[in-house]
Amino acid sequence: MCGGSICVLAAVFALSLVFIFLRDGKKSQRKSKLPPGSMGWPYIGETLQLYSLDPNVFFATKQKRYGEIFKTHILGCPCVMLAGPEAAKFVLVSQAHLFKPTYPKSKERLIGPSALFFHQGKYHTQLRKLVQASLSPEVIRNMVADVEAVMISTLDSWVGGHVINTFHEMKKLSFEVGILAIFGHLENHYREKLKNNYHMVDRGYNSFPSIIPGTPYRRALLARRDLSKIISGIIADRKEKGIFGKNLLGHLLDSKDENGETLTDEQIADNIIGVLFAAQDTTASVMTWILKYLHDNPKILEGVKAEQNTIHRSNDEGFQPLSWSQTRRMPISHRVVLEALRMASIISFTFREAVADVEYKGYLIPKGWKVMPLFRNMHHNPEFFSDPEKFDPSRFEVTPKPYTFMPFGSGAHACPGNELAKLELLTLIHHVVTKFRWEVIGSKNGVQYSPFPVPLHGLPARFWKLPS
Ligand code: HEM
């Protein structure tokens, strides 16, 4: 028992000690200085500069002025930007536990909070294993014929000399391939319902997150709710028929955690929508860039044509299907894919958030700050890629230095869909160069952000079939 006043005194003394300890602890942690850079105006920071300039110009100017690590303030968040390979490795790989993934809440609501890319730790590892297994080379090697069929029917629908919006068409194509990877063969009525609702979600994704009825964001939220219902219907159907398969849905349905718990329909739906989101615009914009780069570089196109025509001839002038091993032996086209990924750098950067005060090379990255490895800056740095604005696939005859080329990210959240994406890109190249010629309409240069960089106006183009 202690007397009242002695007890209070002891408590105050103890609290003071704790306070001094915490304050000094903080002081010693904060000895390092913040990186150089400017934080702009209160609250809005440098958001206006970022959005009024081309974002690449914004980042490149900062890097020139401050070096490979600098601070800024964007959309209400203090950020540290990292433009060097060592720093990217530090954040994404070696000290990845100190940096968690971070997305705006409005986007998380549309995709679904249980999607793997919002998570770290055990749940992320469990989900990632399933996604990776469904997209592994062993699985996707059996998808070549289906990917080829989607490619042929899409390309055939473009001929006739009418102008198409290449990016929009590529989105249709990558959506179909995404559906194949997720569900395997899916009945038409489900596919149509998914397509219509997904289209609404996609339209609202980059709109202002208002829940006022009639706004694109609100409509996207309603469509997202319907998507969950449709996916639950498909799940019930597959369970009833006992068909799981090696596709993503099969893996998700088959999974049990260490306590023997299966995933809920909601967790499955969030991950399915998440993968569809991660797969569609990314692959579609790279496919669009590839058509542009080949169109603008006739010499390179010739080399690719020679490589692909040899395969075409050995496949009985296209009467035999493309094989998995052929898609793995297209060195010239493969280098075109890598160079397109570098040049376009469609994922210019990624976001993480520091979960504690972190020191990097004498600089403090305070807890709660956003951290952005700038992939595009590395991909366009003349120190790592000479004459970086030139489309030159031959540069990939030599492997780039570690962590200087990360089109698919790196570490625990690196892209599990990269093999499928490459299969799509190579299959596109095979069919488009062996059977078609195309002409780009209007301005040849310019970029628009949707939100990934895409050639201006989605690359309007005309396609004609070559005589066989
Ligand atoms: C050319 C096309 C693609 C590019 C350039 C690309 C790029 C990326 C990058 C850079 C990341 C890492 C992001 C980060 O660290 O924050 C990522 C993650 C991811 N990608 Fe891709 N991707 C492509 C296609 C695909 C495809 C086809 C799929 C699936 C079928 C896919 C599924 C995913 C998923 C699920 C993640 C999150 C992984 C995790 O958080 O563990 N991606 N992608």
Image: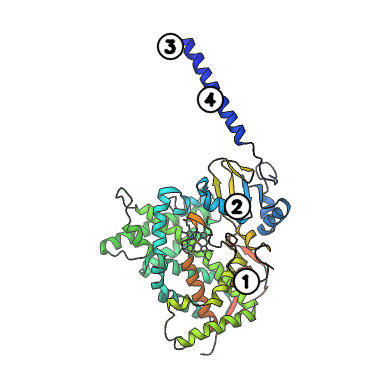
Q: Answer few, some or many: residues within 10 Å of disc 1's Cα (few below 14, many 20 plus, some between 14 and 19).
A: some
Q: Quadrant of residue 388?
A: bottom right
Gap between marks 3 and 1, in whole Å? 78 Å
How far across and down, in percent of the image, does residue 74 sit? 63, 48
In this figure, which residue is indicated by the disc labeled 4?
18
Q: What element carries label 1?
A: helix
- Quick one: label 2 or label 4, which is nearer the N terminus? 4
**For this view, does 419 lie left or right of residue 186?**
right
In this figure, which residue is indicated by the disc labeled 2?
87
Three-letter amino acid code of the residue under disc 1: Arg
Q: Answer few, some or many: residues within 10 Å of disc 3's Cα (few below 14, many 20 plus, some between 14 and 19).
A: few
Gap between marks 2 and 4, in whole Å? 35 Å
Is disc 1 in contact with disc 2, using a CB cutoff of under 8 Å? no
- Quick one: label 4 or label 1, which is nearer the N terminus? 4
> In this view of the protein, can residue 214 be seen by the observer?
no
Mark 4 within 8 Å of ligand 1, using the beta carbon: no
Gap between marks 1 and 2, in whole Å? 24 Å
In this figure, which residue is indicated by the disc labeled 3?
2
> In this view of the protein, can residue 38 be seen by the observer?
yes
Q: What element carries label 4?
A: helix
Mark nearest the camera among 3 and 2 is: 2
Can you say whether 369 is above or below 13 in the image? below
Q: In which quarter of the image is residue 83?
A: bottom right
